[in-house]
Image (spheres, coloured by chain):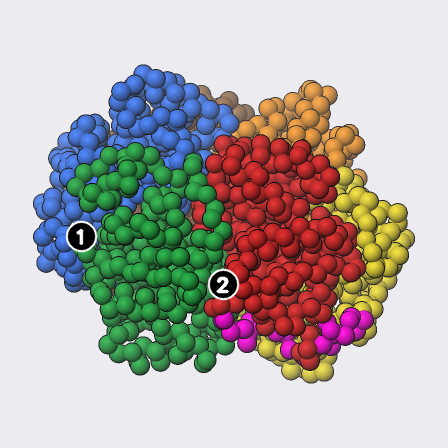
Chain colours: A yellow, B red, C green, D blue, E brown, F orange
Amino acid sequence: MKILVINPNLTQAITEAVTQVARSSASSGTEIVAVTGTFGPEVIASRAENALAAHGVLELAARHVKDCNAVILGVSLDSGLYALRELLDVPVVGMTEAALHAASLLATRVAVLTFGARLVPLYEDLAREHGVAARVVRVAALPFAPTEAFTDRQRVRDALRERCCGLVQADGAEAIVLAGAAFAGMRKAVQADVPVPLIDGIETAVPLAEALVRLAYPKARTGSLSHPGARAAAGLSPELTALLSRRG
Amino acid sequence: MKILVINPNLTQAITEAVTQVARSSASSGTEIVAVTGTFGPEVIASRAENALAAHGVLELAARHVKDCNAVILGVSLDSGLYALRELLDVPVVGMTEAALHAASLLATRVAVLTFGARLVPLYEDLAREHGVAARVVRVAALPFAPTEAFTDRQRVRDALRERCCGLVQADGAEAIVLAGAAFAGMRKAVQADVPVPLIDGIETAVPLAEALVRLAYPKARTGSLSHPGARAAAGLSPELTALLSRRG
Amino acid sequence: MKILVINPNLTQAITEAVTQVARSSASSGTEIVAVTGTFGPEVIASRAENALAAHGVLELAARHVKDCNAVILGVSLDSGLYALRELLDVPVVGMTEAALHAASLLATRVAVLTFGARLVPLYEDLAREHGVAARVVRVAALPFAPTEAFTDRQRVRDALRERCCGLVQADGAEAIVLAGAAFAGMRKAVQADVPVPLIDGIETAVPLAEALVRLAYPKARTGSLSHPGARAAAGLSPELTALLSRRG
Amino acid sequence: MKILVINPNLTQAITEAVTQVARSSASSGTEIVAVTGTFGPEVIASRAENALAAHGVLELAARHVKDCNAVILGVSLDSGLYALRELLDVPVVGMTEAALHAASLLATRVAVLTFGARLVPLYEDLAREHGVAARVVRVAALPFAPTEAFTDRQRVRDALRERCCGLVQADGAEAIVLAGAAFAGMRKAVQADVPVPLIDGIETAVPLAEALVRLAYPKARTGSLSHPGARAAAGLSPELTALLSRRG
Amino acid sequence: MKILVINPNLTQAITEAVTQVARSSASSGTEIVAVTGTFGPEVIASRAENALAAHGVLELAARHVKDCNAVILGVSLDSGLYALRELLDVPVVGMTEAALHAASLLATRVAVLTFGARLVPLYEDLAREHGVAARVVRVAALPFAPTEAFTDRQRVRDALRERCCGLVQADGAEAIVLAGAAFAGMRKAVQADVPVPLIDGIETAVPLAEALVRLAYPKARTGSLSHPGARAAAGLSPELTALLSRRG
Amino acid sequence: MKILVINPNLTQAITEAVTQVARSSASSGTEIVAVTGTFGPEVIASRAENALAAHGVLELAARHVKDCNAVILGVSLDSGLYALRELLDVPVVGMTEAALHAASLLATRVAVLTFGARLVPLYEDLAREHGVAARVVRVAALPFAPTEAFTDRQRVRDALRERCCGLVQADGAEAIVLAGAAFAGMRKAVQADVPVPLIDGIETAVPLAEALVRLAYPKARTGSLSHPGARAAAGLSPELTALLSRRG
C-alpha cells in the first residue's frame, strides 16, 4: 500500500518531520511518499494562508496521487480536505480530522492544543466542520509560533507539558489533540508526564487511512462529495485541470 | 464611495449581471467596480471550485482593492470571505452573508434556494460559518445548473416561483435567500407571486457595505480576523505577496 | 427619509442621548424623530420592565409611525421588536439586533457588554432570539446601574475600557457590542484603547434601517411576522386599537 | 391552598373553561380562583397580542395575588411568565411550560399542537425559552382559529384526533402537548383514540404548582429572576406600581 | 397512594436517609416503601457501577412494584430510568430528573453539584438525556467521596455551602441541584446561607410522582417507551423475566 | 493480535454471523475470538434489553479479555461501551460507534438504518452520546424484527436496498450506517445498487480496533473513563468483581 502525505507549505523540514512520524505508525507493508508545496505560504497559520494552501493541496494531489492508495493531509488545518475528497477516488484523511476521531474513541472530553491564539477559532470551526465539536471542550493555544517548535524545542516542550496538565485539571480534558504539524514527534517526549492520552494527527492518520484502504468503500456517485463531473477551468496545471474534468 | 465587486469565476456574463444588480441598489454617490477571475474554474458549484475561487478572490482583491472603500464577493458561496477579511483594512461583505443577515431582520424562518442538490450541504455549512444557522429552516435546490439561468431563463424562473411558494407552504419560510449569482436580477420578476420577501445577495450587499463604510469601525488589531503580520510566500502575484507581507 | 426612534422608558435624557447618536450616523437625507415613553418603567433593566416596555413600544409606534419610513427601537433589550414587526409595514430594527448583525460582519467571536449581572441571561436570550447566538462567546456586565453612566461618566468609562480589554484577552472577543442605551456616545471615547471594534447599537441601527428602506422588500403576507389580521382589543389607545385591527 | 389562574385575554368563556379543567385536577384542599383580562386583546394568537397580554398578566397578578399560594398562567403562550416570576414571591407556572415538563417525564419525543400555522414559530421559541426544546420533535398546527374550538367543537375534535395520530405515525411523537387554552377539556374525548398521552396545560399546571407550594423553595435573592428592587414607574395601576417598587 | 423508592446500591444507610427525605415531602395520604439493592456495587459513582445498577433497578422494580402507584429512583444517576419506564405501567421518576425539571421552573441558569470530578461528564450527559441541558450552565463537583457525606458531615456541609455560593457568584447559577443521594437531608442546613434555591432530588421527586399519579396519563402503546412486547430472556429472576415477557 | 468480539445476547447464530464478518476485514495477523451472552435477553431491541446487555457485556469482558489486545462490541446499540472502556486497559470499540466515525470520514450527511421504529430515538441518542450527531441527518427503520433478517433474508434485503435509495434521494444521505448485528454480511449484496457507501459496524470496527492497538495510547489515569479505583461489589462473578476492584 502506498500513502501520499501532502504538506502544502514550503517548508521541507516540516515535510521531513511529518514523514518520519508517518512511517513510525505505518504497517510494514505501507510505503509513505511525501511532497512539499511549490507555491503559496511558507507556513500556514492564518485563514489567508489556509485558503492558499487548499489550492496547493489540490495541485500536489493532482500531480502525485497516481499509484497511491490514499492521501493524508500533513497540514494541521486540514486545508482543502473536503475539496480533495470530492475529486479523488481514493480515501483522503486530514491529520487533525484523524486525531479528533481517534480522541473520540478514547475520551468523552477532548481538548485541542495549537500554536498562537489567533488560530483558536479556526480549530473550533474545524471541529464543527468535521462533525465532532460536541466532544471538544476546549481549544487552547501555546503562545509560540510553530517555527519555534524547531528553533526552541526544549522551551516549547516544557510549555506543552504544562499546558496539557492544565487542560486536564481545569477543563477536565480526557484526551488532548496536538494540532500543528510542528508538534510532530513531540508527543512521546511529553506523554509520560500527562495523565491522559496525547494524540498526534499524522501518527493517527496513517492507520486510519490504511483501515479505509482495506475496507474499500466505493466512492459516492452522488452528493456533495461525489466528483462534480466534467468541469472546465483555466490557468491551472494540466494535472489539476485533468482531475477537475475527470480526464485524469 | 467606491466598492469593488469580485467575481472569481471566469464568466464575464456573470460579472456583468452582478454589476447591474449592484448598481441598482447603490446610493447615488457610490461607484461600483467589478472584476472577473483570471484563473480557476469557469463556474463555482463544488467544493473544489470553491477552494480554487478563494485563491482567485485573494489575487483579484490584492490587485484591485487600491482606492476602494469596500469589497463585495460576487460569488454565492462567499469564497475566501474570511481569508480576505483578514488581509484587508476595508470592509468585505459576502453576497450570501449579506442576504442571510438581511433575511434575519425580516423573518424568523429563512429558506435558502440554490442550483443543484449537491450544493445543499455547502450552504448549510455557510449559514453555520456565518453564525446564522439558527434561523435557516431549509436549504433547497432547483434541479438546474446555474448556466441554465441564462440559457433557459423562463423555465428557471417558473421553477423558482413554484419552489418558493412550496418553501412558504411546507417549510413555513418567512423569507427566501436566492443563493446563486445566476439568480441576479431574477428577484423582481418572481417576487409578486411569492407572499414573503425574496432576498438577492448582491442587491443586499451593496447597502450593507455602504453602511459599514459609513460606520468606519477600526480594523481589529488582534484575533483571528486581524492581519496575520508579515508572512512570507512564493509563487503568488507581487500584489498578493505584498498584501500577505503587509508591504501593500 | 424619516426614521422614528422609540425610547419606551420615561427618561427624556436617554431619548436625547440616543437621538444625538442616531443623527451622527444618519445619511444627509435622513431625518431622525424620537419619542419617549408615556407610561411604564423609568428605566428598563429587568424582565418585568421589559414586558411593560413592549406595550409602550407598541403604543408609541401606533401613535407616531405615520409618515415614517422605518422604526428603530432605542432600548437595548429590543423590547417588543417582533411584536412591532408584525404590525407595521415599514422596517423595524432593534438597536442590539443591529449591533449583533454588524458585529457578525466584522468578527467571528462577539462579546456583549451590559450594565448589571442580572441582565446577562436576558442578553443571552436576545442573541438566541435574533438567531446569532452562535457568534456570541460571552455576555458580560459592568457592575453599575445604567443611570451611573450619566452621573458618574468617567468611572463608567474607565471600567468599560478595562472590561473590554479583558474580554479581548480572556475570551478572545473580536468585536464587542455595547448593549445599553446608556452607553450611547461612549464608544468613540473608549475605542482607541481597545484593539477590536466596539459596536454601538443606535449608531449601527440607523444605516441598517436606511438600507432596508432602500431595498424596499415587501411585507410578508403570511407567517409569524405578517400582520395578524383584524384583531379586536379593548382598553388600548385608539391608534393601537386601529393598528391591531388594520384600520390604521 | 389557593391558586390564582390568570387568563389575560378578555374572553370570559375561556376563563370558565380553564377554571373547570383546573378544578378537575386540583387536590381536595386546593381552591382555584380565576381572573380575566380587563384590557388588551380579545384572543392571544400573535406576537403583538402576546406582548399586550404580558402587561395584562402583570396587572392581574398585582391586583389578585394577595393570599394566593401560587399563580398559573391560563394562556398557552405563557405570556409574561418570566416577568411575573421575577416580581412574585410565590411560584408561578405557565400552562404550556407545565405541559412540556410533564411530557418530558413521559416521552423522549414530544410534539406540540396549536391553532394556526403562524403560531408554530412562537411555540418553538417558547420550548427553547423553557429550556426543553431538545425534546420537542415537532410543533404542528390545526388549521382553525381558537374560537372555532368553541363554535365548531365536533369538527375541531375530529381534526385534533386525526392530527395527533399523524404526529405519532410520521414524527414518532411519544406524547403530545395540546397548546391552546381553547383545547381545555378536549383531551379526554380524544385520548382514547391516540396511542400516546395527550397533555393539557392547565390540567398539568395545577398539581405542579401544588408541588412547588409544598416544596416551599425560597425565592432567589440574586440573578435574573430575583425581584429587581425598588423600581419606579408611571401610568400603571397602584397595585402594579407597588409590586414593582416592592411596596406591595 | 403508595410510592416505591428504589436504591439499587447495597448501602442500607443510604436507603434510610433517602426514605426519610422522601417522607418529609410526601402528602399525608402517600406511603413510601423503599428497597435496597441485592447485588452489584456498594456505591454508584462510575459508568460501570451505573450500568450494573440499571440491572439492579429492573430487578428490584420487578419484585416490588406490585400494588405501587409510582416508582422513584433513589440513585442520583437515575440508573436504568428509561429502561424501567419502558417496562412499567405506573409513572417512574428519577431523582435528578425531578430536580432538574423543578429547577427549570425556578431558574433560568441551573447548576448541578455532585461528588468527585469524574462524575461531571456523567451529569452533563444526564441533563442532555433528560432534554434540559439548555438550562444547565455548570456541573461542578465537591472533592469528596459520597461516603464522606456520612462520615465527615460537617466538613462536607461547609464545602457544599462555599461551593454553592461560588456557583452563584462565578457562574450566575439561579438554582442548584444537589446531585447525590448522599446529599439527602443536607439541603435545609445549607439553604439559609445560599441566595438561590437548592434542589434535592428525592424531596422533589415525591410530589412530582404524586402529580403524575393524579394526572393518570395512559401508558404509551407505541414509541420507544412503550412496553417492547413479549421478550424472551434467561438467567434473570422470575419476576423480571415475567415483566419482560408481560406475563407479570 | 487478538481481538475479543462480545455479543451479549443469547443468540449463537448472531455471534457466528458477526464473527464471520469480523474475520473478513481483519489483518492477516489478527485473531478474532467471539463470545455469546449467558444471561439476559435473547435479542436486544429495547432500552430494558440494552440495560441488561450492558451487564452482560461487563461479565463477558471480565471473563474473556485476558490475553486480548482489544474488545469489539458486537451489539449494535454498543451496550455498556463507556462502562467497559472505564474498566479495561485495552481499547474497546463499539460497532455502531466505529461505523459512525468511518462514515464521517466519507460523507458529510450520514443516515443510520435499523430494525423497528421504536429504536429510532435510541440510535439518535447513541449518535449524540458518541459526539457525532452533527453529521447524522436521519435515523430510519425497516419495519422488520432483526430476526427476520435471518428467516426472510431476501425480503429484508430488498427492503434494505429500497430504503437506502430513498435515504439518498429524500434525505441527501452521503453514507448509510447499517445499525443492527442482523445486517452483518448483507452490505455487499446491496452496495452495488446504492450510490453511496454502506457501512457495516463490525466490518469497520476491526481495522479501527487494530489501529488503536497499534497506536498504543496510554489509558487515561484521570477523568470519567479512567478506572474508578478499588470498588466493592457483591453478587457478581469473581472475574467482574476482580475487575471492578482492580484485582484482575
Name which residue type carries label 1. Answer: Asp
Q: Which mark is residue F68?
A: none
Q: Residue at x 28, y 68 (%)?
A: C16
- Residues drawn in magenta: B216-242
- Locate the C terminus of chain E by quadrant: top left
Residue identifier under label 1 = D89
* The magenta stretch spans residue B236: yes
Residue A123 to residue A165: above or below? above
Residue identifier under label 2 = B211
Percent position of residue F162, x then y: 69, 26
Percent position of residue E87, x then y: 44, 30
Q: How many marks?
A: 2
**Disc 1: which chain?**
D
Q: Quadrant of residue A2?
A: bottom right
Percent position of residue A193, x then y: 61, 73
Q: Quadrant of residue F113?
A: top right
